[in-house]
Amino acid sequence: MALNDTSKTQISIKKLVGKAHTSNSKGVANESLPTGITLASSTIFLQGIPTTTGSVAHYEVLDNSLGEGVVEFLRLSASFIPGSDTTDGRHGFELKLPDDYESNSTNPLRGVYPFNNQQSINITSGSLQLIPPSFSTAYEAKAYHSSGGQTQIPVLDARDWNLDYFNGIFFQQDPPGTGAHENNPKYIDAYLYIGNYLDSGNFSSGISGSLQNLTDGSSYLVAGDNITISSGSNGQITISSTATSSGGSGGGTKSKKAYTVTDSISSGSSFTTTNSSYDDAGHDPSLIDVFLNGQLLLSGTNTEVSAGSVDYFVSDSNKLKFGFDLNIADIVNVVVENSGSGGETGNPGGLNTQVQFNDGGSLAGDSGLVFSKTTNTLLTSNLSGSLTRLSDGSSFIKSSTGINVVSASNGSISIKVNKEMVFNELLGGTINGLNTLFTLANTPFASSEISIFVNGQLQTPQNLTTYHDYSVTGSNVYFTTGSVPAQGSLLLAMYNKVVP
């Protein structure tokens, strides 16, 4: 058994026009529940989906490759949709979150809409979505009825069923019986997306940690000369430049350098800090600060290091010796203050809240780059295109079928659909019972995304069955000789046209 042609056609057409399919006896205009194709930024998954699920229990949260919990395995309840029944039985069912979701889930957003008890998926406009098997066959939902306990409904069951993973609508073509039959679906085991959507990755609500690393795990921001970058657990990024001092024993400029350990360094061996000169500080420990992975270390003499009472000592003009091993990927930060009396005073430039930067050796600020510590928001009036591409030159956001992504020189990104639905268009051509060639006002996005109606009767397209009524080439519609519209017929078309 399989879905018949009527079901296939109804599901396809209703999906294209944004209606959920609940019954073959209902036309497009009579369907009341919405559905959609995931295109809006508020319904596009921002975070990666795990490629495998493994053996999981209900309410278990799965992590993606970056360790982010984005998928939750749930048993969803199925409720009959009034009005979706026929004389054959009940066809349409809506899926809802469990009655006890808020008390059993470990989702950090449980209790916050739409993650509420008994929340119907289809009315959230894509805020709740199930992971479809397009990501992995392991995500294929499992349906159950309550006859004889909890009995699984096979994918190839005689009822021929379909699940809309976007809006959680379950449809069965041939119900097992009429009314509230015990073999109607009661539960659906499926995977709910609980991660962030694309519209959450912006500056208006603060910067999340998702911008800190690329997909290969490397840092999105890389520190250059005289720059130190640190990332907080809440997603905040702190960028520090070469500082100046107006006090202290030296009163000179401070040089900050960061070094990544590329080879293991054993205790007592020299570690070279190429761009830091301890001669500038006169080897005065009070003018030298050394940090290991953010932790300030204690300096002393070679004897004290050997005795284990201090962490390091300065062994040469640009070398340090530590009382412990350094491991690969450790970060050593060195701050050296010039012991001379000259140098920049260190007074901030610009106005309050303006971010400081090195302007020819002096601190400066600009109204085009400000930071609010109240809202933890970085604001700029001229965002460059650096966010639109990765370090290898590839696009940060990629277009796909039916979607165009355009990056402007000021850094703005426009995402738009490059196709648009045309409804009830009259075909051009002579309707005399003999003519087989008719024309559309626009070229369809694809020949498979068009429906032709003759006097309200849907015509069979090419490549669907061994028989067809018409074919489409460009903007031309060719009827077969056996399906030529009779004189006086009404010819209407519904299709996706190309949008420049």
Image (cartoon, rainbow, N blue to C red):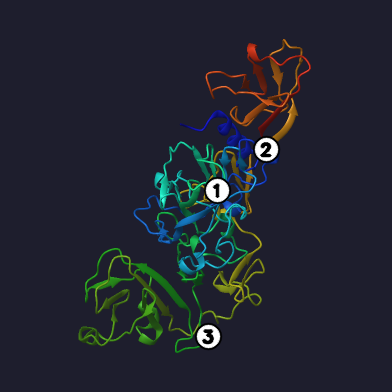
Q: According to the image, label 1 marks what residue?
A: 180
Q: Secondary structure at mark 1?
A: loop
Residues 273 and 26: in front is: 26
Element assignment for label 3: loop
Per the model, the C-alpha gap separating discs 2 and 3 is 75 Å
Which label lies toward us, 2 or 1? 1
Q: Which residue is mark 2?
A: 28
The front one of 369 and 84 is: 84
Give the label, 1 or 3, closer to the camera: 1
Q: Amino acid at mark 2?
A: Val
Q: Mark 2 or mark 3, which is nearer to you?
A: 2
Residue at the farthest bottom position? 249
Residue 444 vertical placement versus 388 (above, below): above
Q: CA distance from mark 1 to mark 3?
A: 81 Å
Give x and y (percent) for residue 302.
23, 84
The answer to which image quadrant residue 173 occupies is top right
Picture coordinates of residue 352 (x, y %)? 65, 77
Q: Residues within 10 Å of mark 2 (few under 14, many from 20)?
A: some
Q: Could you tell me which secondary element the residue under label 2 belongs to? A: helix
- Check whether the beta carbons of the residues at disc 1 and disc 3 lie within 8 A of each other: no
Which residue in the structure is indicated by mark 3? 246
Quarter of the figure that contains the C terminus: top right
Q: Residue at 57%, 59% (x, y): give it.
A: 119
Q: Amino acid at mark 3?
A: Ser
Q: Quadrant of residue 154?
A: top left
Q: Decide: few, some or many residues near mark 1? Use Cα within 10 Å; few <14, some 14-19, many ≥20.
A: few
